[in-house]
Image: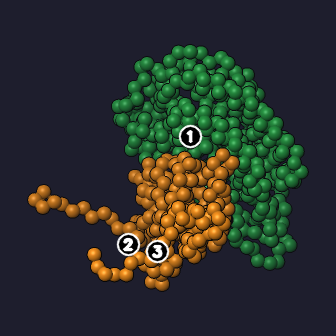
Amino acid sequence: MSVSELPPLSSAPGPHVRAVHDQFHGDLLEVSMGPHHPSTHGVFRMIVTLDGETVVKLKPVFGYLHRNHEKIGENTSYLGSMPYTDRLDYLCSMTNNWSYALAVEKLSGQTVPERAEYLRIILAELTRLLNHTCLAGFLLQDGGASGTPLMYAFREREKILDLFEALSGSRMMCNYQRFGGCRADAPPSWLGAALTLADNYGRFLDEFEKLLTGNEILMARTQGIGRLPARLAVSAGITGPMLRAAGVAYDIRKVDGYGLYPRFDFRVPLGDHGDTYDRYMVRVLEMRESIKILQQALRDIPGGPVMDTKARLRGFRAKPGEVYSRIEGPKGEIGFYLISEGGPNPYRYRVRPPSFVNLTILEDLCLGHSIADTVVILGSIDIVLGEVDR
Amino acid sequence: MSDAAPPPPTLTDAERDELRRQGILLTSLEELYNWGRSHSVWPLNFGLACCAIEMMAASMARFDIARFGSEVFRPSPRQADLLIVSGTVTKKMTPQVVRLWNQMPEPKYCIAMGACAISGGPFKQGYNVLKGIDRYVPVDIYIPGCPPRPEALLHGLMQLQEKIRGQAISGRDAPRHLQPDMACDYPVPEFGQHDLEPPQNPALWQPPVLTRKEGA
């Protein structure tokens, strides 16, 4: 879909602009939210200018978790950067690993055995389940439902983390994928446990949705709040569930068909209104599609090696050149851009973080809404500061 | 040895247990006070990075930090007893962390959770990463790991409880806030031309001195 086909943005001033110019007699109030604020998902700061309770200006302040990921990546060997990618978006280490491994594989022309491709898809979809479940919990926590939805979400998260730990040895920082395959093979018992989890996850989603989806308070807090027009989403480079909630059918799993995704039968859920409720709903529907992918992958996974026999990890030198690889992470397009000059480490190492790019339209979403809504809108964008600030 | 007065007679643990079985509780004010304090340590709801997710996991159903009386995560530093520095402290964030610590009322404790909070961890070589929060804030418990498992956080919390139970209410072993000559306010660093000014609080941390052996 091209930008020209999308409906145009309205040029009429919104209600917030009228509030400033016509009826406004008092003082504006500037509130600094963060970097220590329970709802900002880490150390993120918003300088919000308020007219009463209505947001008239919002200035995001980044950099409180800028830990020099890219600069460190330029001074570290290709393999040495893999554990750092875990710590980018620390909820989704497996998809970060995959995107980085894909970049180096493209650079060096390595192939990946079929079993490893299946394992990568299984782990990426498990990560998607984990991320979307936690997001729904955090969103509701920000909305004021203290505790309960997050408890349900973390109960399921622990089950997925147990699988990750059994396979990679670590709960959160898996450091599992390598260029040319995966670090360790999954035993049949692990595949069985993953299939049990996938089969039971639908029941958890039913329970979760029964609590939330039709909930009157959730609908009142999220429907019509933070509406994102499709044209703005496309021109700002928004990706992932946020873009699809605005009604644009763009999923890199379908567009690029990387890995073995073309073999799988799944649908891409789209939103109608682009509001916060749609962003919640699209993620719930995506989880149901992920379960389908998981069941297909766990049924069809072939035997064989999980590492390319010609792969060389230590002392690895890439051919000179530059490469960009991207995958559909749970938050959107996670990409790595590498320039190699033939040395043991990349000359330039750049991350394309989905949550940073998705955060750029925060002000457009929040203008005209109340200060309490900014918290819910921020929650629905789904940011992780490790990735925003890098 | 000398003809000093013999120590006052004390009860053995077995005798105490026997009395407790008969419904008589013998304790000192100090023990009662510390027992109460150690079982209601309220942490500050303050996440920095990856470790914050594991901190949250520790407060959820599976690990259930409520068993140790610490489930009341307070969003305001004025109501908190415990600062869990959970993640990488960058130089941009350091003044805010120290200010939060200053805003907490005494008695207060600090846990450095994870490699980053202890020493900068994997990001130590980064130009914007503080190489350990103990340069500005007195740390009571260090929990290594990247990130530490929730069980490790619970273990750290139990160690802290042990430490609280061992504190005196008066005298030389009394905690900081009961000693009039101890500072409770810590200087907040500022951005200088190149780095944080001062680069550390010299009363808390000093760079290690390397001494050469004679003739080496």
- Residue lying furthest left: B215
Which residue is at the front of the view, A140 or B156? B156
Q: Where, quadrant-wise, is the N terminus of chain A in this rendering?
A: top right
Measured in 3D between alpha carbons, the distance from the residue under mark 3 to the one under mark 2, in whole angstroms, is 44 Å
Which residue is at the front of the view, B171 or A293? B171
Which disc, if any, is residue B9?
3
**Residue drawn at point x = 70 percent, y = 71 percent:** A30
A270 left or right, relative to A318: right
Color used for chain A? green
Q: Nearer the viewer, mark 3 or mark 2?
A: 3
Type of amino acid at the residue the image marks with label 3 = Pro
Query: Percent from the top left, x then y, of residue B208?
Result: 31, 63
**Residue drawn at point x = 42 percent, y = 36 percent:** A78
Label 2: state its secondary structure: loop
Which residue is at the front of the view, B180 or A218? B180
**Residue drawn at point x = 76 percent, y = 28 percent:** A267
Asked whether the viewer can see residue A320, the reply is: yes
Residue hosting label 1:
A171
Colour orange maps to chain? B
Which disc, if any, is residue B202?
2
Label 1: state its secondary structure: loop
Q: Tell me if residue A298 comes above or below residue B40 in the rendering.
A: above
Asked whether the viewer can see residue A271, the reply is: no
Which disc, if any, is residue A187?
none
Q: Tell me if residue B201 comes above or below residue B126 in the rendering.
A: below
A367 left or right, relative to A162: right
- Answer with the quarter of the image where residue A284 lies: top right
Co-location on one chain, circles 1 and 2: no
